Image (spheres, grey):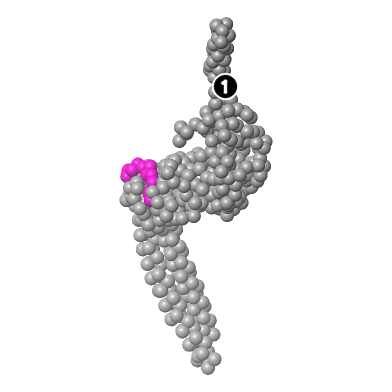
Amino acid sequence: MSTSKKFWLYFLIIVVIIAGAVYYGTRPKPISVYVKQVETGDVEATVANTRAGTINACKRAKLAPTIGGQIAYLPVREGEQVKKDQILLELWNDDLKAQIQLSKEEAVASTARARQACIMHDVAHREADRLVSLKKKGLSSAEQTDQAVGNSRATQAACDAANASLKESEARIKVAMTALERTILRAPFEGTVAEINGEVGEVVTPSPVGIATPPAIDLIDSRCMYVTAPIDEVDAAAIRVGMKARITLDAFSDKNFAGQVSRISTYVQDREKQARTVDIEVNFEKPESINDMLAGYSADVEIILNTKKNITRVPTEAIIGDGKVYLFDNGVLAETQIKTGLSNWQYTEVISGLQAGQQVVTSVDQTGVKDGAKAEIDTSEN
């Protein structure tokens, strides 16, 4: 081969190598994407609260005496368990106790007077009957008989008046005891003393109309708890009493609790600068679930509207637009139209267009994700 031909051959080889290097260096690099497999499983249609809900005790009473006065007796402390009707607080009431004692003494005196008056009537009645009988035999004058009959009737009236006075005395005792009871604050149910506002010697006053004041004692029965949560008015229309729910709490972030919708509010909350919501109540299905829970904890509820089991499902985050996904197939992304069904924030039912085992892109917002793009799987997720 001549020198000239060798030169051009070498030159051509060099050009091809340079062109290959340029192409290799400038070709589009595969984008790195996250993918998940299409699988078979359960899908639920759910709705959740729009703002944090609250754990409430089934029984909670913010108690205060119905009258004002000075605290004379405060036998309980915060955190103490109390029984139903146990005394929680007592105002100074020595005057009322004295009034009860006086009424009881008056009742004793009234009883004695009534007995005396009724004995006198009994004697007068027997005398009147005797004279009436003698008169019929002509052995007693009409004047004596009429006087005896009148005396019997008078003593009968005196006996009735004395008995009425006795009942009045007994009623006074009840009135005084009722007034005394108003100074005593008793537990309306078994529970725990959550808060006490006041000490012995301090004066408590009832709340004026329309003005809320701290309760003397806040009593909570923590043996029964439920959740109240606001649901957007759009979602609330699909909820029914008896539907299953999941309850989650920030205080128990590693757990969720089974619940059931027990009440749906009959009106829509319309608060300024907030979306319109409907309050719902959810009971805990298992009583032991509420162990160690405190009233006032924040809680979220997820109401299960419908469930389909063992169906083809895809991560909801993989779906774009009107039911499209990007399939990862041998390093190339393929935009695929699918038909979807039941859906929640985690999974969406696939009616057609995908099969279990295929891989779909979940990082759909990543730059460069498009139909036909070359890609590689990023294994750093999780």
**199 part of magenta stretch:** yes
Percent coordinates x, y for residue 329 in the rendering = 58, 35
Q: Residue at x 54, y 35 (%)?
A: 35
54 with respect to 103 (left or right): right
In the rendered view, would you say 211 is above or below 222? above
Name of the residue lying farthest toward the bottom: 137
107 with respect to 232 (left or right): left
**112 part of magenta stretch:** no
In the rendered view, would you say 282 is above or below 368? below
Q: Which residues are magenta?
A: 192-202
Query: Considering the image in quadrants, where does the C terminus appear?
Result: top left
Residue 312 in view here:
yes
Query: Considering the image in quadrants, where does the N terminus appear?
Result: top right
Percent coordinates x, y for residue 100 in the rendering = 38, 58
Q: Residue at x 32, y 44 (%)?
A: 200
Name of the residue lying farthest toward the front: 1
Q: How many marks?
A: 1
In the rendered view, would you say 376 is above or below 213? above
Q: Residue at x 49, y 55 (%)?
A: 285
Q: SS at mark 1?
A: loop
Q: Nearer the viewer, residue 54 or 333?
A: 333
Q: Amino acid at mark 1?
A: Pro
Q: Nearer the viewer, residue 361 or 108?
A: 361
Residue 26 in view here:
no
Percent coordinates x, y for residue 95 in the rendering = 36, 52
242 with respect to 83 (left or right): right
Q: Residue at x 55, y 48 (%)?
A: 41
Q: Pointer 1: what residue?
A: 28
Percent coordinates x, y for residue 326 in the rendering = 61, 34
